[in-house]
Amino acid sequence: MSQVIVDQIKVLIRDGKLQPGDRLPSERELCQRFGVSRVTVREALRVLEASGLLTIRVGAHGGAFLTTPSAERLGEGLADLISLARMTAANVTEARFIVELGVLPLAVERATDEDVEALFAMVAEAEQALEGGTYNIEMSAAFHIRLAECTHNPAIEMLMQSFHGPMRMSIEESHLAAPMSRQGVEEHRRLAEAVKQRDLEAARDVMGTHLDRTAQRVGSTTD
């Protein structure tokens, strides 16, 4: 019965009858509406909260409020699924070839001056971090996500954001095999330059080389 409640609330969200920020009825009202116990209602609320669709607030103005699942939460969930499914970094890297190369045509076509400036700023920050020995996986992943944002397609942006966790897994295992180097950051600069010049062929060449090196580091999917 708790799953029935979860499913019905999801339907109301999809139909636009419930919006982020809306407060759900009280536990008592939900019990009466569905003809179930408080234990069942609380279990449904826990499921919705765990999925990122709900937040529970306490206090005089508390209650169960609908939220929009964050891309970070989606990425964490996807990374967990990959871990539990025994997928390897090599599997993830193969998926990155499909997703990230596929992003490039729209990124090159639609990137604004602000987008290009942001990409170069991230490269400059990465170069400074390399000098100071503070460059990390998050900075590398962030560049790839920002590149996807150049498409100005919300669906693609959400896809890449949700792919953040698995992408970190791929990058992290790659750098267990070889430390972070200037080569990756220099390729990020070349990608930014290709976007600036609207040069799709150059962008594909750089991204292909960039991902191929990661693939070689993490090994074959059949290992």
Image (tube, rainbow, N blue to C red):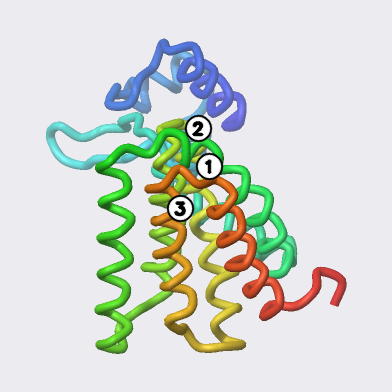
Amino acid type of the residue that numbered disc 3 sits on in the rendered structure:
Ala
Which x, y percent locates residue 10? Answer: 52, 24
The residue that label 3 is drawn on is: 194
* Left or right placement of residue 105 versus residue 59 in this view: right
Of badges 3 and 1, the one in the foreground is 3
Callouts 3 and 2 close, C-beta under 8 Å: no
The residue that label 1 is drawn on is: 159
* Dot placed on the residue nearer the N-terminal end, 3 or 2: 2
The residue that label 2 is drawn on is: 155
Amino acid type of the residue that numbered disc 1 sits on in the rendered structure:
Leu
**66, above or below 192, in the image:** above
Quadrant including the N terminus:
top right
Q: Secondary structure at mark 3?
A: helix
Give the camera-side residue of 162 and 42: 162
Which x, y percent locates residue 162? Answer: 50, 48
Which x, y percent locates residue 102? Answer: 62, 43
